[in-house]
């Protein structure tokens, strides 16, 4: 994803999904706004631009409308969660839910349905393994009737966790298989680009 993202920017001098001349240079693509800001309903155009220019393989990513991400217009993670790329200001998880951290930043959202122990491992490899700190954090942007909350995917207890000695009163760790309650099978995260 990262290679495709930066190759597109290098080639077209624009963000995928925001490229204002997409119809002219990418077969079957819709023009982006050209404002340097991607909203959630522009996220499918990110995948459309990356697919149309040959950087991704995504047969369902051909929709030319600005609509919310779905299985019919966006990439899916290995567990069937809908991925998205857009500017989002919810990137600090607390037990009350994702907090609005102020200014929006461009993020790749993993989509939901990922087991908490798996997404925790992704966080450890990309960042620090803590669900509410760093560049990779809990995020539940994929709102469905079965979307878990922060408390479902994380725990304040560091037992059965690997990592540093952060203050447990504010640190949220991803649930491991040995955590109590155990792994939540439907979690998601996001990472800043």
Image (tube, grey):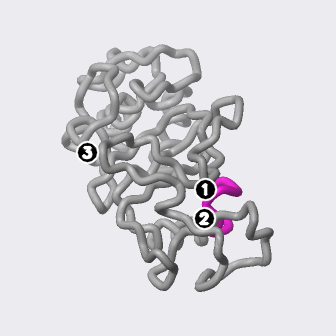
Mark 1 lies on residue: 136
Residue 129 is inside the magenta segment: yes
Q: Position of residue 89 (x, y in %)?
A: 62, 34
* Residue at 55%, 42% in the rendered image: 107
Tell me whether the residue at label 1 lies in contact with that at label 2, contact meaning CB atoms closer than 8 angstroms. Answer: yes
Q: Is residue 153 above or below residue 89?
A: below
Q: Is residue 56 left or right of residue 193?
A: left
Q: Which badge, 2 or 3, is on the more N-terminal residue?
A: 3
* Residue that carries the numbered disc 3 in the rendered image: 58
**Label 1: which secondary element:** strand
Please state if 77 lies on the left or on the right of 102 as rendered. Answer: left
Q: Return the mark for residue 97.
A: none
Q: Report which residue position mark 2 lands on.
A: 126
Spot occupied by residue 181 in the image (x, y as percentages of width and height): 46, 75
Residue 80 vs residue 157, the one in the foreground: 157
- Secondary structure state at the residue bearing disc 3: loop
Is residue 99 a member of the stretch shown in magenta?
no
Q: Nearer the viewer, residue 58 or 129?
A: 129
In magenta, the rendered stretch is 127-136
């Amino acid at each position: 994803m990262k290679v495709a993202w930066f190759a597109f920017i290098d080639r077209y001098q624009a963000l995928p999904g925001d490229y204002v001349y997409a119809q002219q240079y990418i077969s079957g693509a819709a023009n982006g706004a050209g404002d340097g800001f991607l909203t959630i309903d522009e996220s499918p155009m990110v995948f459309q631009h990356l697919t149309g220019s040959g950087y991704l393989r995504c047969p369902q990513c051909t929709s030319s409308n600005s609509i919310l991400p779905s299985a019919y217009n966006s990439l899916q993670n290995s567990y069937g969660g809908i991925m998205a790329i857009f500017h989002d200001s919810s990137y600090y998880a607390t037990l009350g839910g994702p907090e609005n951290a102020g200014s929006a930043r461009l993020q790749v959202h993993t989509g939901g349905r990922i087991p908490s122990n798996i997404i925790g491992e992704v966080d450890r490899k990309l960042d620090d393994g803590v669900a509410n700190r760093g560049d990779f954090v809990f995020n539940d942007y994929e709102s469905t009737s079965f979307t878990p909350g922060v408390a479902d995917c994380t725990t304040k207890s560091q037992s059965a966790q690997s990592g540093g000695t952060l203050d447990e009163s504010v640190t949220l760790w991803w649930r491991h298989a040995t955590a109590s309650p155990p792994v939540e099978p439907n979690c998601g995260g996001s990472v800043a680009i």
